[in-house]
Image (cartoon, grey):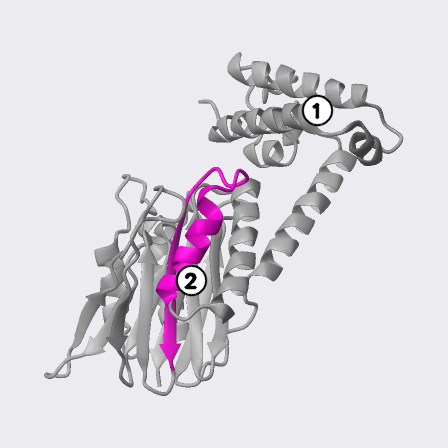
Amino acid sequence: MKPIVLERVRTSLLERQVGLDEWLRTTSAHKKEVLLGSSTEQAVHAHLDTIKRSIGEVESDVLGRCEVCRDYVDSDLLEIDYAACVCIDHLSDEEVRNLELDLELAQRVQKTLLPQEPPNIPGMNIAAYSRPAHILGGDYFDFVECGVDTYCLAIADVTGHGIAASLHMASIQAMLRSVVPTSRSPTEVVKRIHKLFIHNMHFVTFVTLFIGIFDSITRTFSYCNAGHNPPIVLQQNAVGRASIVWLDPTGAAIGLVEESEYAQRTLSLHEGDLLVMYTDGVTEAANPQGEMFGSERLAGVVERMYQSPPREVVSGIREDLEGHTDGRPLADDATVIVGRIT
């Protein structure tokens, strides 16, 4: 079966070809001379020839094939070098070591984009877990102080995974951290990010995004959900039992439609309430029979562990997820954030 990554390679190459053709056609001779340095315009044309040849090889099912075994080269390797023509198993020891160093560096860079420790948010205890399906992933979560006694909790899922998704994830982080401090509401944050995203030629996919702003004084949680999996809030009802509130989408995913209306909702939180945010890598994880983990099973795990600290709730979800998949690797990136109102 043809790896999905090859279609992403083809799309990327077509975009690169269009960009270089435009650059050659519209850039002044002086600017070309500056940008090319000691190279010549012929070197650009040579690069374009390589790109066009590679596009043809994708379409004719040649690109990505191992020269030794004729099977497809590993997807992780193609993400780093689409011209790779030998499987990892057939590389020399030195080539494997160099590849491992490159992958380790890329993974280390991505990890620095995600919070390394739970944030210190007055009135809320936080625990989080995130695991990419491959070496690099497209899940993103963050915590940003956005005003006096107010804190932004964000979770996003870039369509796809691997290097392309991780680069988009880094862009979402940069946008979020720039937009949140100067925005008045979750809805404004989402609208501004959507506007930055929708016509940007570098973004060829869409992103689900949930933005919640917690006010530690009033204990209110205002949120805007752009096509993301509905977070769960467990609240103790009048008879002492936990009732579930689903924070359903209030607008389309970022970059999915030209114009989207984004509504905002506000929820009053109380001591003991539990907030659970997650990506679809959790609910869509399949067992050997192909059955998904599902949102109802996730809610059941959270209900059973309602009285437990956030860190234990995260561990409980991970254990149940591993049991459901029979210990097999997840097919998609998976992220869980749990917050307890104190």
Identified at 53% across, 38% down, the residue is 201
The span picked out in magenta is 186-215
Identified at 75% across, 40% down, the residue is 98
Amino acid type at mark 1: Leu
Amino acid type at mark 2: Val
Quadrant showing the C terminus: bottom left
- Is 167 inside the magenta-drawn segment? no
* Residue 76, visible in the rendered structure: yes
Q: Secondary structure at mark 1?
A: helix
Instruction: Say which mark, if any, is on residue 9.
Output: none
Q: Nearer the viewer, residue 25 or 179?
A: 25
The image shows residue 114 at horizontal and vertical percentages of 55, 62
- Using the image, determine if residue 190 lies above or below residue 73: below
Q: Nearer the viewer, mark 1 or mark 2?
A: 1
Instruction: Say which mark, if any, is on residue 24.
Output: 1
Q: Which residue is mark 2?
A: 189
Identified at 84% across, 24% down, the residue is 40
